[in-house]
Image (cartoon, grey):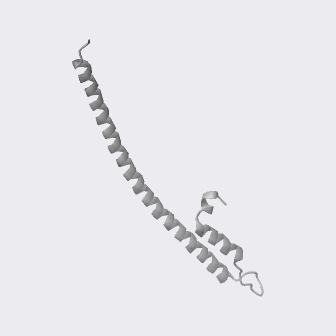
Amino acid sequence: MNNELKRIPAIKDIARYLREMNFKKKLFGGCDEENVLDHIEIVTEKYTEIIETLIKQNVNKDKEIKTLMEKTKQAQERVNYLTEWQESAMHYIHANVKSY
């Protein structure tokens, strides 16, 4: 199992469910189809919940990224302003300092 998937607790629950599930047996013909389909439905619901959770987390991360990008842009604008101010101050000092 992928390491990132192992960090999702629900994945472990599904894996445990799959290991521990038992199918009802038919007298003839193997497993009871309805019982198998019930198990598949349960697993599908669990994976759907995981997917929905991951989508919500992704949306939240996208919002965080946009906020951080905006803050970075504002910080860069401040740095640019201060750099221009510093350069102007240096030009002023050099222009107005008399040699001794």
Q: How many marks?
A: 0
Instruction: Judge by depth and name the residue closer to the eye, 34 or 24.
Output: 24
Residue 57 in the image: above or below residue 68:
below
Tell me if 45 is positioned left or right of 61 in this view.
right
Q: Residue at x 34, y 43 (%)?
A: 75
In the image, farthest residue toward the bottom: 27
**Could you say where residue 14 lies in the image, as x and y percent from the top left?**
63, 71
In the image, farthest residue toward the right: 28
In the image, farthest residue toward the top: 100
Instruction: Judge by depth and name the residue closer to the eye, 45 or 67.
Output: 67
Q: Residue at x 29, y 30 (%)?
A: 86
**Could you say where residue 96 lies in the image, as x and y percent from the top left?**
22, 19
**Could you say where residue 34 lies in the image, as x and y percent from the top left?**
65, 83
In the image, farthest residue toward the left: 96
Q: Residue at x 39, y 56 (%)?
A: 63
Quarter of the figure that contains the C terminus: top left
Tell me if 31 is positioned left or right of 84 in this view.
right
Tell me if 79 is positioned left or right of 10 in this view.
left
**Could you say where residue 21 lies in the image, as x and y percent from the top left?**
69, 78
Instruction: Judge by depth and name the residue closer to the eye, 94 or 5.
Output: 94
